[in-house]
Amino acid sequence: MRAALSLPGLAASLHAHAQASPEQGTVAFKNVEYADYQPHERRMRLSSPMVYWYFPVKDAFAIEGAAATETLSGASPLFHNTLSGASGLRIHEHRRATDIKLTAFLRRASFGVRAATSTENDFESSATTIESRISSEDNNTTLALAFSGQSDAIGATGFPLLHEARSSRSYLVGVTRVLTPLSIVQSNLTYSAGRGYFSDPYKLLDDRPRSRGQFAWLTRYNRYFPATESALHFDYRYYRDNWSVQAHTVDLKYYYPLGDGWTVRPRLRYYTQSAAFFYSNAFPPEFPGQPYSADQRLASFGAVSLGVKLVKALKNDFSIDVKAERYEQRTQWRLSGRDSLPLQPFYAYVFSVGMAKKF
Amino acid sequence: MKLHAFSFEAMACANTLEFLWPRRGGAATAAGTIIAEVKRIETKYSRYRDDSVVSRINRAAGGKAVRVDEETAALLDYADACHRQSDGLFDVTSGVLRRVWDFRRAVVPAPGRIEAVLPLVGWERVHWSRPEIRLPLSGMELDFGGLGKEYAADRAATVAAEQGVAHGFVNLGGDVRVIGPHPDGSPWIVGIVHPRKPGAVVARVALSAGALATSGDYERFFEVDGRRYCHILNPRTGYPATGLQSASVIAPLCLVAGSLSTVAMLKGQDGCDFLDGQSVPSFRVDANGVLTRHDIQPQTSLAG
C-alpha cells in the first residue's frame, strides 16, 4: 500500500480527461514516469501506463472508463544516507486501477454513477459515486452535487494478522458561473468523513486517529484572452482536517497556442501545509499510547511544482502531448506550522507522454 | 568538500562507497584503490575461483594440511573464536549444507539428505594449528561467506583512511562501515531495511563511527506450506534459522557486527537474549514483526 495515487502530480491524471465534451467520443492513452529523490539518492520510481475512453450514446448517455497499472520500485522517501539489510532484496509493487462511469443527459441536467476499484497485493479499495449537474435556464450557472462512498481493505506483506479496514463518505457541492463570455468562476466545497484504519502498517509505531474529517474549498477562475487565443487557469484550494492539517494550494496554468496546432502550457503550483497534531520526528514517541506518526507527509512543509506541457493537434482529431514537471519540497518553504526539525529536501520528476483521438 | 558516491559490484552484491574529498581531483583514484581492496578480498576468499585460498584448502580436504598466510590465519582465528563463543553456531564449515538446500528450486530436502551431509559440518573436527589447516574428511568445505564481506568493509575503511579520506562510509551489500563522520562531527544516518516490506525501513540509526551489519531471513528464502526456509543454515540441525526476521548489530568492526547478527539469527528467539548479553547496541525484528532494541548508550534513532 504505497498509496501511489498520493504521489504529487499523479492524483488527478487518471481523471484529467473527464471533462471531454459530451458529443464527441475520445480514446486516450498516456504513460507516466515518476521518480523522486533526496540528496545523493534515488528513492522511488513509478511507471504507469493508462487508457481512457469516452463513448456518447445517442446524445442521451455516455459511458466512460479508465484503467491504469502502476509499477513501483525503490525506497520510500525516508531520511537516511544508506541502508543496512540482508542483500538481495528486490523492490517491486503493482497496482491496478479501473474506473467506469455512466452519465445520463437531460435537457439541463446530467446524472452520473461511477464505480472505481484499486488493487494492490496488500491494499484494496472500491468507491461508488453518484453525481448530478443542473444548469440554470440561461445555462450561465451550473450546480454540481455529488456523493461518494469508499471502502478500503488494508493488509501488509509479512504481517498476516493485519486485516484492517476503513470507510469514508464524501459530499460535494459546487457552483460554476459564467461571468463574462471570456471568464468562468467555479467554487466547490467537499467534505469527507472517514472511519477506520488510517495508520501506515509499514511504519514503525505509526498510530493515527481512527477517524478523519476533511474539508476542502476549491475556487477556480478561467480567463480567455482572445487577442492571443490563450487562456489562464487559476486555482486556489483551502484544506483543513481534524488532524489539524491546514493546507493552501495555488495552481496557475497558462495555455498558449504557438500556431500550427501546437499549444504550450506552463504551470506553477505552490502548496503548503501545517503538521498533523500527532506528527513527531522524535523516536520513540514522547507520549506512548497517544496518536503518533513520523510520516513526512504529515509534517509541515512547502512545495513548489514547475511544469510544462506541450500539445500538438494533428489531423483527424488526433493529438499527442508530452509533459515534464519538477516538484520540490522543503520545510522552510512552509507558510506556517509547528517548529519541527527540518526534513531533507525532497524532489520529484514526472514525465508523461500521451495521445488522444476524438471521433 | 564535495560528496563523491561510487557504486560497484563485488561478492554478488550491490555496493556503495561515499566520501567527502578535500581536493579538486583524485577522488576517483582514491575510490579505485578502495574498491580494489574489496575485490582483492573477494578474489582471495571466493569459493568460485580455483585459485582462491578457500579452494586450495577445500581441495585438500581429507588429505594434507595446508599452510596459510597471515591474513587468512587471522580470519581463521577469528572464526575459531566465534565458533567457541556461539556454542558452535557460527561455523565456517556449514557451507556444505547448500548442497542439499537448493534455494532456486525451492524444495525442502528429502528425509535423510540433511543427515547425510551433517557429518561434514563442524569446525570442531577441523585441525587448525596456526599456520596450518586440515579438513579431515573428504567433502568438507570452508566457506568465508559469513566473514568475507564484513572483513572487506573493514579493510575498505582502513584503506580509505590511508588514502586521506576522513568523512564517509562504505556499504557492502547492506553491511555498513563508517570511515569517519561528517566534517562537523554529525553522523551518517543508516536505515535498517524492513524484513518484510521492500523499500521500507524499521529504524534509522545515527552512526558516526564503527559499523552496522544486518542479517535477515529475507535475502534468499522460499516458502512451503506457509513456512519460510531462509539461507541462514544451522550447522547442528542442518535446517534454516527461524525465530527472528532480522538482527542488526552496531560494533566497532563490521566483522564483529556481522558475526553477532548471524549468530543472533541462528539462535532464533534466544537471539535477543544473546545480543542483550553482548556489549553492543542491536535491533531485532522477531517472528511477529515486532522490533526491539538494546542500547548500551543513548542512540539517536528515528522511526521510518
Image: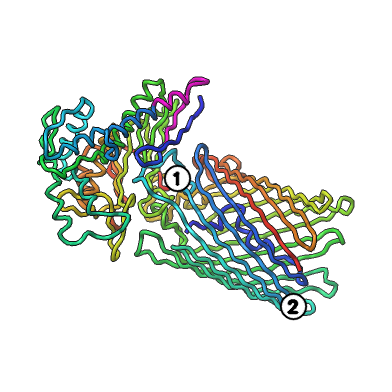
Is residue B183 or residue A250 the one in the foreground? B183
Q: Using residue A256 as the reference point, say whether residue B270 is left or right of it.
A: left
Is residue A272 visible in the rendered image? The answer is yes
Which residue is pictured at 53% across the width and 66% down the height?
Answer: A118
- For the residues bearing labels 2 and 1, Cβ distance under 8 angstroms: no
Helix, strand or loop status at disc 2: strand
Give the answer, above or below, for where A110 lies relative to B139: below
**Which label belongs to residue A281?**
1
Rate crowding at label 1 as few (under 14), some (14 to 19) or many (20 or more) other CA atoms within 10 Å.
Answer: many
Amino acid at dot 2 = Phe
Residue A93 horizontal/vertical position (percent): 47, 57
- In three-dimensional space, the C-alpha distance between marks 2 and 1, rounded to whole angstroms, equals 51 Å
Q: Quadrant of residue A12?
A: bottom right
Rate crowding at label 2 as few (under 14), some (14 to 19) or many (20 or more) other CA atoms within 10 Å.
Answer: some
Residue A81 horizontal/vertical position (percent): 44, 38
In front: label 2 or label 1: 2
**Residue A314 part of the magenta segment:** no
Is residue A37 or residue A79 the one in the foreground? A37
Q: Quadrant of residue A302?
A: top right
Residue A253 horizontal/vertical position (percent): 74, 51
- Chain of the residue under the numbered disc 1 shown in the image: A
**Same chain, marks 2 and 1?**
yes
- Chain of the residue under the numbered disc 2 shown in the image: A
Provide the residue designation for mark 2. Answer: A105
Helix, strand or loop status at disc 1: loop
Which residue is pictured at 13% across the width and 28% down the height?
Answer: B130
Magenta part of the chain = B16-33
Image coloring type:
rainbow
Amino acid at dot 1 = Asn
Is residue A280 or residue A176 the one in the foreground? A176
